[in-house]
Image: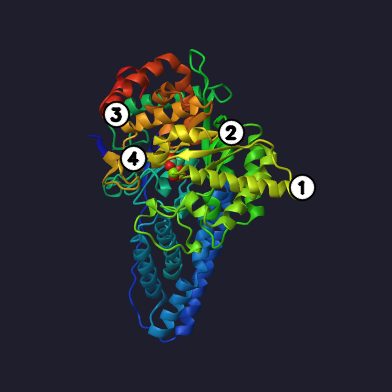
Amino acid sequence: MTTTLEGIAASKGIAFAKAFVLEQPEMNIEKKEIEETDAEIDRFQKAVDHAKQELQIIKEKTLNDMGEDKAEIFSAHLLVLEDPEIIDGVTAKIKDEGVNAEFALKELSDMYVTMFEGMDNEYMKERASDIRDVSQRILLHLLGVENTSLAAIQEETIVIAEDLTPSDTAQLDLSYVLGFATDIGGRTSHSAIMARSMEIPAVVGTKEATSAVGSGDQIIIDGMEGRVLIAPDEKTVEEYKGKQQEYLRQKEEWAKLVNESSVTKDGRRVELAANIGTPNDIEGVLSNGAEGIGLYRTEFLYMGRDELPGEEEQFEAYKTVLEKMGDKPVVIRTLDVGGDKELPYLNLPPELNPFLGFRAIRLCLEETEMFRTQLRALLRASAYGNLKVMFPMVATLEEFREAKNLLENVKAELIQEGQAVAEKIETGIMVEIPSTAAAADLFAREVDFFSIGTNDLIQYTMAADRMSEKVAHLYQPYHPAILRLVKQVINAAHNEGKWAGMCGEMAGEETAVPLLLGLGLDEFSMSATSVLPARSQVRSLSGKEAAALAEEAVQLPTAKEVEALVHERGFVTS
Ligand code: PEP
Ligand code: MG
């Protein structure tokens, strides 16, 4: 009989294959007394060198297969191998305590992992996972244990693992690995993000896949519903074959829309744009037919390094994006750090409520040298495409005016230096703080556009931390308060002849698209892989009907009723 495990749908698609359960290699680490400590240090150093060579090879492979931003994970791993706190720490432990290298490394890395994992900070949590991954690699060399090689998989397989580390995912040969399921992780965990960029189905957070599935078991994974089916009976296989066919057929239909416009049946045209984090994402943006970039999160240029990026480096990144996008609009957001995105090298004092603290535009308006460098790079790049500049986390008009003023000053300075700068650069703001949404009519007189950042707007309006599972039920995009704020922001923009977009996750959700269309949203910016499904949906809708739906929806008292209305009226198909 079929056994079904429920997990989190991490990457779309359905796969059928035998399972390969990734075993954690047996590593018995005992404490031993060592007399020849110099020889032990030598043995440790050799293991570190081996790990370094391996990582360099993996980094190259990832760079070729998946691009620079994914390869950066391994640059971070290589940095761990050079981190004196760890490497010198282990050496000192071997020498001072006369213990074996395995024991010294395990003790030290466990200490750092526990310390970093306990911090309420995504960046430090990532460092913890880097250290865990790297020390595991060195330990395997020290113990002479063969890494149960994912790379050795030679038949069609679905990988089942407790979790997949970056090193694991880099080893997957996609001609054999059809998908994976893990015990832990969420939709934004590393393995889930990798699965989406590799375009293979994945289910994460099943809690018990590794204990319930045996290597060689026939299984099905459903990346749409977040299900793992073990030993499926014939009827289940038939049913899922049908689902798979349907998904593939739908994908083919979507692919036909790459060069089509995003226009409703009754002729309302909207812009479907993509969100990006680095210039490497452009390939996916273009292959998915996005009509522009609605949000370029520049903070990734500043993260995972020891110092601020200089003007030239930033200029090159922005110029690359603008050139590749041709005359399509590119909204580049100025630095948005703080909250969950920390830059350790800025040495900012810790805060009790970082999401309500010294971040984004608040920080940039004080660290003006840092901000001016970014503005110079942006303005110089503006000569190469259709740039629009956007300021994040704006709460007051003074902040917008001050930022705009700086931009104007920097522009005048560049012109005086004889640098080419585009004549007209639209300047807008993210609407992600309730004060700005509530006073949108006042902002609309001065900005060129709004982009609604629902990821934050929902968390601040509902007072529900966007990172907390405990209050996830309060994080409600369809709450009447959110829909009314969105409506108010769009109307305020239109009353002043400006445009309004949305770059929070909500913009790409199937239930949200008809509502937002009905509320009059002009630009929808989403992950690149959502663009074609959204275009297909827009083309099947009538603008007039969507407007009637939205009007009814904003009067409903609860999010549940709004969602039910959109489904009942047949505006979504799944
Ligand atoms: C948002 O808040 O909706 C947004 C798009 O910005 P970020 O997710 O980068 O905070
Ligand atoms: Mg935000």
Residue 377 seen anywhere in this rendered image of the structure: no
Three-letter code for the amino acid on which mark 2 is drawn: Leu
Mark 3, Cα crowd under 10 Å, few <14 / some 14-19 / many 20+, is: some
Which of label 2 and label 3 is nearer to you?
2
Q: Position of residue 3 (x, y in %)?
A: 24, 37
Q: Quadrant of ligand 2?
A: top left
From the Cβ of disc 1, is ligand 1 less than 8 Å away?
no
Three-letter code for the amino acid on which mark 3 is drawn: Thr
Mark 3 or mark 4: whose residue is earlier in sequence: 3
The residue most toward the right is: 418
| Foreground of the two, 400 or 260 | 400
Q: Which residue is mark 2?
A: 286
Q: CA distance from mark 4 to mark 1?
A: 46 Å
Q: Position of residue 332 (x, y in %)?
A: 56, 42
Q: Position of residue 559 (x, y in %)?
A: 28, 30
> Residue 461 has which mark?
4
Which of label 4 and label 2 is nearer to you?
4
Horizontal arrangement in the rendering, residue 375 relative to residue 122 (left or right) = right
Residue 225 seen anywhere in this rendered image of the structure: yes
Which of label 2 and label 1 is nearer to you?
1
Q: Which residue is mark 1?
A: 418
Q: Are marks 2 and 3 in contact (CB under 8 Å)?
A: no
Q: Position of residue 193 (x, y in %)?
A: 44, 44
Q: CA distance from mark 2 to mark 1?
A: 33 Å
Q: Are marks 4 and 1 in contact (CB under 8 Å)?
A: no
Three-letter code for the amino acid on which mark 1 is drawn: Gly
Q: Which residue is mark 3?
A: 236
Occupied quadrant, residue 464: top left
SS at circle 3: helix
Three-letter code for the amino acid on which mark 4 is drawn: Thr
